[in-house]
Image (cartoon, rainbow, N blue to C red):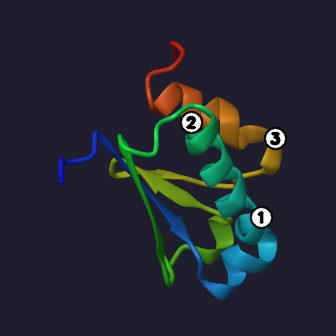
Amino acid sequence: MSEKSHTITICMGSSCFSRGNKKNVHLLQQYLKERKLEDNVLLKGTHCMDQCDKGPMMEIDGELIYHLTEESISEILDQKLGLTSL
């Protein structure tokens, strides 16, 4: 198995989960599938990232991303995965 180019960790703790990450995880999966990035990006969940007041949140390649919304996910992923310029 080859190593993935990027790692996305989404918080699935109860606060982030109830504040939007339940739906956001499906949006992340859909994004990766539509862009054929599943072989290049490791998507995983974690129980809690201990920053509940800033959630819902995820981490991309070690960088924490706070206050995720359904509307912001595609733009954030485009930027962080190098599909658009910052």
Q: Is residue 82 left or right of residue 12?
A: left
Query: In this figure, which residue is indicated by the disc labeled 1?
Result: 23
For mark 3, give the secondary structure. helix
Point 78% across, 79% down: residue: 18
For mark 2, give the secondary structure. helix
Point 77% across, 64% down: residue: 23
Point 68% across, 35% down: residue: 74
The amino acid marked with disc number 1 is Lys
- Residue 8: image x %, image y %? 44, 54
Choose between 29 and 61: the one closer to the eye.
29
Between discs 1 and 3, the one toward the N terminus: 1
Point 80% across, 49% down: residue: 70
Mark 1–mark 2 Cα distance, whole angstroms, equals 16 Å
Between discs 1 and 2, the one toward the N terminus: 1
Quadrant of the rendering where the N terminus is positioned: bottom left
Residue 77's label in the rendered image is 2
Q: Is residue 28 left or right of residue 50?
A: right
